[in-house]
Amino acid sequence: MRKRSKIWLAAAGVLLGAFIISALFLPKSYGLAAFSDIAQCLFLISGLAAIVPLAIRAERRMRLFWSLIILGVSLWFIYQLFWTYYEVILRTDVPGLFVGDVVLFLHIVPFMAALAVRPHVPRDEYSARVGRLDFALLLLWWFYLYALLVLPWYHVVANLSAYNSHLNAVYVSEEIAFLVGLIACWILSKGEWKSLYANLFGMSLCYASSSTLANLAIAGKEYYSGSLYDIPIVMSMAWLTWIGLRTKAQQPAADTREVSTLYGVWLARCSMIAVFSLPVFAAWALSDNAVPARVRVFRLTLTLVAAFFMGVMVFLRQYLLDRELIQLLQHSRESFENLKRLHAQILQSEKLASIGQLVGGAAHELNNPITAMLGYSDMLLSTSLTAEQAPFAAKIGQYVRRTKSLVASLISFARQAPGPKTPVDLNTLARTAVKLTQSQWEALDIKVRTQFDPALPKVLGDSNQLLQVCLQLVASCLHLLSGRGGQTLTVSTEQQVGIAVVLITTSAGNSTSRLSGRF
C-alpha cells in the first residue's frame, strides 16, 4: 500500500475514533448533531474520492460497475446533505413526511444495478440486451412498489405513521434483496473479486442493520444525530474508503464458474414474476377498504400505468428473443450446409487418396520395364549405328527418359506429401542434367556448352524435383533440335535481382531461342 493511502486510512480511522468517543460520552446537543452530520458527509466524500480513480482506470464493464457504485454513494451523500442542511443550518429536525426519503430509497438501486453488470464473470452466452431488459423490468417494479406503498401517504393523504411503516417495509425489503445479490456474487466469485464482494456485503449488512434499528428508535422517539445508533452507520461509511483504497479487482476472474445460462433464466423468471404481480396488487388495491378511496384510486391508476410500461418492455423483450431465435436458426442452417460441404470434401479426398494409391502402384509396376528399356536404348546407342539409325536410337532413349520422368512425377503425386526442402546448388543440378543427357545430345550431333555463375546463391527446394525440371528443360530443347545436327545448346546460370535463373539457349546460324527457369 502506498504511503498516501496509509495516511488516508489513518486519518479516516482517527475521525471514526473521534466519532465513537463523542457518541459514547457526549450528551444530546446541537454541537454533537453538527459533528455527526459533518463527519458522515466527510466519510462519504472520502469514499467517493477513493472509488473514483478505480472507475477512471477501468474499462468497459469494469468502468460501468464502479460508475454505478459511485452513483449509489453520491445519492447517499445527497441524502446526508439534506439531513445536514436541516439539523446544522436550519437547526431543526428533518420533517417526518420528507420528500427527500425517495433519494434514500434510490441510492441502493445503482448498487443493485452494479451487481447485475457482473464484472467478475467473463462475457456469457446469454443475450446481453435481453438480460438488461429483464433487469430494467425489475428496477421498474421496485419504483412501482415504492410509489404504490409509500407515496399515497405523502401526496394523496398525509399520514405520518402509515408513511413511516410502509417506507421502512419497502426499504428493508430492498436492502434484503441487495444483500441476497451480494451473497450470490460472493459465492460465484474467486480471488480479489471474492474479497471485494465480502467487503461490500459487510458494509451493506452493517448499514442495513443499523438503519433498521435507527428507524425503530425514531419511531420510539429515542434517536438523535450522533447517538449510539449512528456508530454502525458511520462505520459502514468509513468502510467505503477501505474498499476504494484496498481493492485490486481490475479484471474478470478467468476461473469463475460459468453460470451464464442459469443467471439469465433466473433473471427472466424474476422479471416475469414482477409482471404477473401487477394484477395481484390491483386486486389488493381495489379490495383494501381500510384505506381512503383516493388512495385506492391512486394505487389502481399507478398499477395500470405500470402495467402499460411493463407490457411495452415485455413486448420488446419478446421481439429481441424472436430476433435471436431467427439468427440462431440461420446459423444452424449455415452450419448444416457447411457440414454437408465438408462431408463432400472428405468423400472427394478419399477418392483422390484411392486414385493416388492406384497411380502409385501402377507407376511402380511401370518403373521396372522403363528402366530396362532405358538400359537397352543406351546400349543401342553405344553400338556402331549408321547415320540414319543413330537419330532414331537417340529418340528412343529420349522418349524413354521422358516417360521415366513422368512416372517419377506420378510416384511423387501418390506420396500425398511434399519432400523435404534443403538448400540446393543450381550449378550442380544443371551440370548433372547435362551429364545425364550426354548420350542424347552426342547422338544427335549437338554441341553443348556450359556457363555457370560461381556466385549463384543456393535455393531452397527438393533437389530431385529441381533436377527433374532441369532434365525436362534440356530434353525439350533436344527434342526441338532433333534432326538438326551441328547446332549448339548453351546451358548457363545467372542471378537476376536476387533470383537464381537457369538459361538454356539454342543457336543455329543467326537464329537463337531460349528457355529459362527461375528459382
Image (cartoon, rainbow, N blue to C red):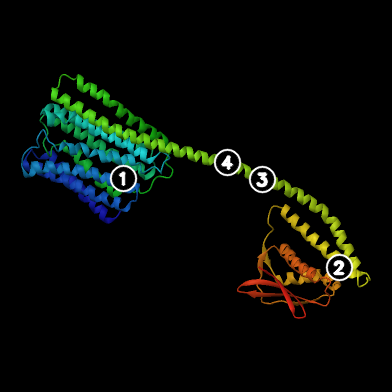
Counting residues from the start of the chain, the first of labels 2 and 4 encountered is 4
Regarding mark 4 in the picture, which secondary structure is present there?
Answer: helix
> Pointer 2 and pointer 3: residues touching (CB < 8 Å)?
no
Q: Which amino acid does the dot numbered 2 rest on?
A: Ala
Counting residues from the start of the chain, the first of labels 3 and 1 encountered is 1
Regarding mark 3 in the picture, which secondary structure is present there?
Answer: helix
Tell me where residue 128 sits by quadrant.
top left
Residue for point 72% across, 46% down: 354
The residue at which mark 1 appears reads as: 65
Nearer-the-camera pick, 405 or 247: 405
Residue 383 lies, in percent from the top left, at: 93, 69
C-alpha span from label 3 to label 4: 14 Å
**Mark 2 or 1: the one toward you:** 2
C-alpha span from label 3 to label 1: 54 Å
Q: Which amino acid does the dot numbered 4 rest on?
A: Leu
Q: Callout 2 environment at 10 Å: few (<14), some (14 to 19), or many (20+)?
A: many
Q: Which mark is residue 394?
A: 2
The residue at which mark 4 appears reads as: 339
* Residue 288 visible, this orientation: yes
Regarding mark 2 in the picture, which secondary structure is present there?
Answer: helix
